[in-house]
């Protein structure tokens, strides 16, 4: 077995604490990765606190992993020791269903294997995430990181970046297209940077004026504070695509009404309560409402390459492992600009 050190939630009610554990032995197609940085995603908090249903404890969260290959299995062909690599939200899939074969492993018909809080394909071995000093992963679920990108700023791209890139690719964001991003947080700020690099006219819709300056510094063309419903009157029919990164409760119909003819609003943040949708708002301009979650391995590598070509990184606050619990508290309070990243060399 491979010895590892990290931070784990031993129960849903306990804070994360140092924990030593074992990972599987290096298989013939596996990489052992020395983790340098691991991002904190809001979903880590939900799962560690068992807010999304049953969970597997002890749990080592983390699915935004950037590091260096330290060992390779005998049949590895895509990577070598010393390569800069990343691991995202899943580490395996059935590989045989139509979705896996088409490069949409994230929609595997037999379910992808999550990087943590899951079990390997054997149904027995638990998966442990990136809040640790190393990880063992099949090479087919690892991406290469361009040399010009700092690993600390890359880590959040493995979840937040692909969550925004994948729908932009699917709905063909292009120069001149009018794209709105709802929420300027860990997800939203990546959406702004990526959409701008694709040539879109990008508008940020944020609850308050607090992040207005940040939005413009990151390249936003327009910014509107949506705390007052009056602001929506001037936005009717304005956007071709809206990417909704907000999971807090809000009136989705106000935003649907800002779509142009044939426009689409894509849900990326999981709402606590179901939306109440006025069908008339959709019918009136042949509008659509859709959803998207992360992306397949091909898109993940494509996204990383795109970010390398355009020098796109996440805005991060680097922390030591001892600060993880405080970072959870601050993340829940939206007190981070814009992603916490753990220095894994300190585990």
Image (spheres, grey):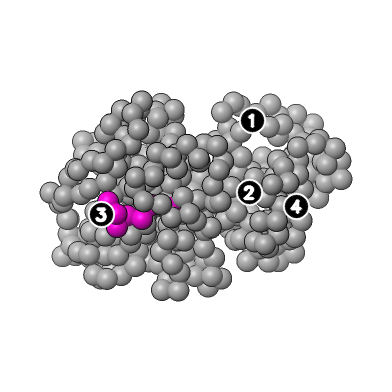
Which numbered disc flags the more N-terminal residue, 2 or 4?
A: 2
Q: Which residues are magenta?
A: 341-347
Rendering coords of residue 275 (x, y %): 65, 29
Instruction: Residue under label 4, please give it.
Output: 223
**31 and 249: which one is in front?**
249
The tag on residue 184 is 2
Instruction: Residue under label 3, please give it.
Output: 134
Q: Residues within 10 Å of mark 2 (few under 14, many from 20)?
A: many
Which numbered disc flags the more N-terminal residue, 1 or 4?
A: 4
Q: Residues within 10 Å of mark 1 (few under 14, many from 20)?
A: few
Rendering coords of residue 271 (x, y %): 58, 32
Q: Residue at (42%, 71%) from the top-left corner?
A: 146
Q: CA distance from mark 1 to mark 4?
A: 21 Å
| Local SS, label 3 | strand
* Magenta-colored stretch includes residue 231: no
Rendering coords of residue 151 (x, y %): 41, 64
Q: Is 145 situated left or right of 303 in this image? A: left
Q: CA distance from mark 3 to mark 2?
A: 31 Å
Instruction: Residue under label 1, please give it.
Output: 249
**22 and 152: which one is in front?**
152
**Mark 1 or 4, closer to the camera:** 4
């Amino acid at each position: 077995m491979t010895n590892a050190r990290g931070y784990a939630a031993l129960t849903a009610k306990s804070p994360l604490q140092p924990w030593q554990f074992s990972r599987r032995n290096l298989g013939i197609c596996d990489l052992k990765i020395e983790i340098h940085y691991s991002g904190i995603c809001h979903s880590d908090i939900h799962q560690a606190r068992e807010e999304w249903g049953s969970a597997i404890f002890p749990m080592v969260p983390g699915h935004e992993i950037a590091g260096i290959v330290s060992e390779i299995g005998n049949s590895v062909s895509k990577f070598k020791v010393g390569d800069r690599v990343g691991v995202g939200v899943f580490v395996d899939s059935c590989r045989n269903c139509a979705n896996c074969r088409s490069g949409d492993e994230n929609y595997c018909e037999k379910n992808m294997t999550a990087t943590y809080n899951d079990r390997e394909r054997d149904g027995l071995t638990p998966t442990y995430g990136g809040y640790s000093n190393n990880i063992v992963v099949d090479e087919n679920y690892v991406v290469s990181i361009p040399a010009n990108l700092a690993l600390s700023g890359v880590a959040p791209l493995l979840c937040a970046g692909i969550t925004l890139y994948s729908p932009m690719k699917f709905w063909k964001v292009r120069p001149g297209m009018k794209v709105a991003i709802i929420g300027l947080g860990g997800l939203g700020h990546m959406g702004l940077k990526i959409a701008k690099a694709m040539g879109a006219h990008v508008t940020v819709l944020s609850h308050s004026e607090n992040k207005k300056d940040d939005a413009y510094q990151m390249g936003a063309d327009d910014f509107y504070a949506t705390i007052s419903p009056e602001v929506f009157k001037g936005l009717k029919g304005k956007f071709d695509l809206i990417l909704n990164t907000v999971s807090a409760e809000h009136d989705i119909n106000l935003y649907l009404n800002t779509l142009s003819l044939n426009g689409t609003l894509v849900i990326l943040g999981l709402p606590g309560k179901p939306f109440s949708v006025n069908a008339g708002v959709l019918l009136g301009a042949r509008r659509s409402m859709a959803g998207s979650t992360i992306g397949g391995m091909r898109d993940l590598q494509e996204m990383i390459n795109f970010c390398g070509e355009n020098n796109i990184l996440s805005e991060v606050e680097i922390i030591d492992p001892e600060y993880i619990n405080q970072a959870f508290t601050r993340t829940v309070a939206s007190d981070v600009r814009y992603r916490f990243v753990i220095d894994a060399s300190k585990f």
